[in-house]
Amino acid sequence: IDGVLLFESSYDLDPALLRLETLEGRFARLRSLVPRFREAGLEVHINVEITMGHGDAGGARPERFDFQFMVNQEGLVSRSSPCPLDPGFLDYVGQIYGWAAGCMADAVWVDDDVRFLQHDVPGMTCFCPRHLAAMTERMARDLPYTRSALVADLLDDGRTDVREAWFTLQEDAMLDLAWRVEQEVHNVAPGQAIGLMTVGTTFHHAEGRRVDRFLRALAGEGRRPLLRPGSGFWSD
């Protein structure tokens, strides 16, 4: 063993999202542990396990947060995963990664649930009011998009213009989140590396995220990205 990976939470024991007052104490604990591992000659990485919410296994408490949570094409609202178009959620994420960087580890990792797909609601997301308003603006529509109208246009093979705008919006939302993480981490620890746990390129492509651009946004200008390949090892 030449290094350790420290987490701030547990999928099995914690709710889908943790309040900042809880996380502040946990990152303080991790900060106290990092030098002890260094003294033992080990490399230390911090892995934020819950950024956008893993899923609702019955313990989600969305009422604790003033966020817009994701909405799928059927109108089901996620209990675990906020929409990254919500500025308040980006502030929450920024605080988390600022604390993670303050642990002064060798690297900070972003969890593999930072995505639009495969949370606690099936199918595609997000069709929340923020997404509908953004798509209305991008398509220069006179009538505001409703969820059903946007879904219908996305399923229409003749509306490639809507699909292009949709996937661009999805990528822009994720890139804004990546830039916020990078900014917060490097404001605290300029030399710290930032990595991404992935879930395979198929999932990323289906939601509009381009892995290479996302990785480089996370890493920061002129920095080498860190990547943990995902999916296969769960069943190796």
Image (cartoon, rainbow, N blue to C red):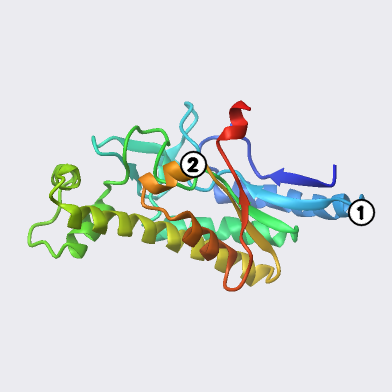
CA gap, disc 2 and disc 1: 33 Å
Which of the two labelled residues, at mark 2 and mark 1, occupies the earlier sequence position?
1
- Give the number of the disc on residue 39: 1
Question: Where is 30 relative to 94, above or below?
Answer: above
The residue under label 1 is which amino acid type? Glu
Residue at the far left: name it: 142
Of residue 24 and residue 144, the one placed in the foreground of this image is 144
Q: Is residue 54 left or right of residue 161?
A: right
Residue 74, percent across and down?
A: 23, 35
**Residue at horizontal 66%, vertical 69%?**
188
Question: Where is 105 relative to 231, above or below?
Answer: below
Query: Which class describes the residues within 10 Å of circle 2: few (<14), some (14-19), or many (20+)?
Result: many
Decide: marks 2, 1 in contact (CB < 8 A)? no
Instruction: Give the residue number, with chain letter if any, for mark 2.
Output: 53
- Give the number of the disc on residue 145: none
Of residue 172 and residue 7, the one placed in the foreground of this image is 172
